[in-house]
Image (spheres, rainbow, N blue to C red):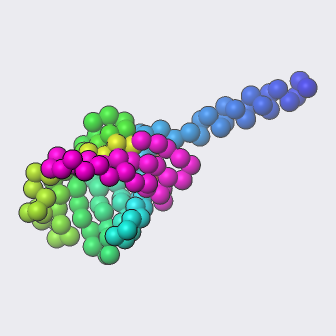
Amino acid sequence: MKKIIPLIVCSIILSCSEQKTCEDFKNGKFRLTSEVGTTIIDRKDNAQIETKDGINYYSEVEWINDCTYLLKNHRNHDKEVDEEEIGNIYKVEILQIFKDSIKIKTTANYTDFVFESTLDILELNN
């Protein structure tokens, strides 16, 4: 019995230390699958590249807090300002963290539409 208790305590400590927090998602690669296709998201600190159908789109990332960030200053595949996106800001909130995915809510400053989706975790770079 004396040998079992330390094993249980170690197991609990290790399982708790492996829990991810919102901050773990500031750098990494994710997959968004929706009815319009698959988008790969590559985020590094304050920059995000979204790749869909082999075409890259670029956005600046501004973290408001550990679980919420803004996507703004969008540029098209030629890294030029995307005229259709001028002034558009997307707010993304991390709602839930799972072992292999995260649930997010996205809103925009130009519509009342709320989009909830799941991002599969492909890689985390802390």
**Most common secondary structure along the magenta stretch:** strand
The residue positioned farthest toward the bottom in the image shown:
54
Q: In which quarter of the image is residue 68?
A: top left
Vertical placement of 122 versus 4: above or below? below
The residue positioned farthest toward the top in the image shown:
2
Residue 74 at what x, y percent from top left?
A: 17, 57
- Left or right? Give the position of 87 relative to 29: left
- Front in this rendered view, residue 83 or 2: 83
Residue 92 at what x, y percent from top left?
A: 31, 46
User: Residue at point 53% right, 47% down?
Assistant: 98
Q: Does residue 112 belong to the magenta stretch?
A: yes
User: Residue at point 41% right, 64% down?
Assistant: 33
Q: For the magenta stretch, what is the residue range?
A: 95-123
User: Residue at point 17% right, 62% down?
Assistant: 75
Q: Can residue 55 be seen in this view?
A: yes
Residue 117 at what x, y percent from top left?
A: 40, 54
Q: Does residue 11 belong to the magenta stretch?
A: no
Q: Quadrant of the N terminus?
A: top right
Vertical placement of 29 versus 93: above or below? below
Vertical placement of 8 versus 79: above or below? above
The residue positioned farthest toward the front in the image shown:
112
- Front in this rendered view, residue 121 or 84: 84
Q: Quadrant of residue 58?
A: bottom left
Q: Can residue 89 be seen in this view?
A: no
Residue 82 at what x, y percent from top left?
A: 12, 63
Total marks in image: 0
